[in-house]
Image (cartoon, rainbow, N blue to C red):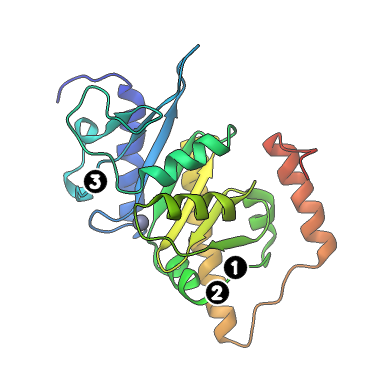
Amino acid sequence: MQQHSYQSDRESIVQAIRELDSRGLVSGSSGNVSLRLPVEGGQDRYLITPAGVTYDRLDEDGLVVVDSELEPIGEELVPSTESLLHLGIYQSRPDINAVVHTHSLYASIAAVTSTHIPPIVDEMVVYIGGSIEVADYGFPGTSELAAAGVEALGDRRAVLLRNHGMCAAAPTLHEAMRIAVLVERIAQIYVQAEMMGGAVELPDYAAETERQVYLMRSGLAGSD
Ligand SMILES: [Zn+2]
C-alpha cells in the first residue's frame, strides 16, 4: 500500500466502514463516510469513500480527496454518489467535520413509514438534538436529495432520508459513528413501539432541558 496524504484520516475512515459493516449497518457498497479536511487560509477539502466499491475491497488507497466543487484532487477515483449530501451538510454546518450515511435497517423502515421520530428516549435529545426528521424524497445522488437532507437536519446531528436511509453528522468521526449506531437503536425502539400500540414521547420539560444541554455542548446555544 502506498503512503498518501491524510494517511491517518484515511485509516480512520476505513476503520469506520469496517465497524459499520461488522455492526450490520452497511452492506455491499451502500452507505458512505466522509471527513472535512480543513485547509488553512483556503477552501476546505473533503475525504470521502468512493462510488460503487464494496466494503470488503475498500482500503486507504481507494478513498477520494475532493475540493469544494467535488472535483477529485490527485486521484483518478470517483467519489461516493451521495457526495452532494455530504458537501451540503459541511457547507451549511461549520460545526460538522464528519458525515456517516447508511441504509441501516430500522432507520430505513422509519424513513419509509414515518414523518419523523419524535423525542422518545433521553439520549436522542442530548446527543442528536431532538427529533429525527425525515427529509422529503430526493432521487439518490441529486442536489434535491442533498437540499432536502440539509433542511431536515437543521441544527441536529441526524436525519432520515425518505425511502432511503439515514445520515449522521458530528464534529468528529468518532461522534458521527456513535450517532449512526444510536440512530439505528432509536429507530428500532420506535418501529417496535409503534407496532406495540405507539411510542410515548418524552415529557416536554425533559426534552426542552435536554435540548439546552445539546445546544450548550455543541456550541450552538443562543441559536434556538
Ligand atoms: Zn444512500
Q: Provide the residue designation for mark 1.
A: 116
Type of amino acid at the residue the image marks with label 1: His
Q: What residue sits 55% from the left and 85% below the top?
A: 195
Task: Find residue 83 and report its horizontal and vertical position in percent.
Answer: 36, 43
How far apart are the alpha carbons under marks 3 and 2?
29 Å
Q: Nearer the viewer, residue 121 or 159?
A: 159
Q: Is residue 120 left or right of residue 55?
A: right
Task: Find residue 215 and report its horizontal and vertical position in percent.
Answer: 73, 42
Task: Find residue 1 and report its horizontal and vertical position in percent.
Answer: 14, 26
Q: Provide the residue designation for mark 3.
A: 51
How far apart are the alpha carbons under marks 3 and 1?
29 Å
Q: What residue sits 66% from the left and 67% below the top?
A: 118
Q: Are marks 2 and 1 in contact (CB under 8 Å)?
A: yes
Q: Is residue 2 left or right of residue 120?
A: left
How far apart are the alpha carbons under marks 2 and 1?
5 Å
Question: Is 92 situated above or below 73?
Answer: below
Q: Nearer the viewer, residue 107 or 70?
A: 70
Type of amino acid at the residue the image marks with label 2: Ser
Q: What residue sits 58% from the left and 48% below the top?
A: 157
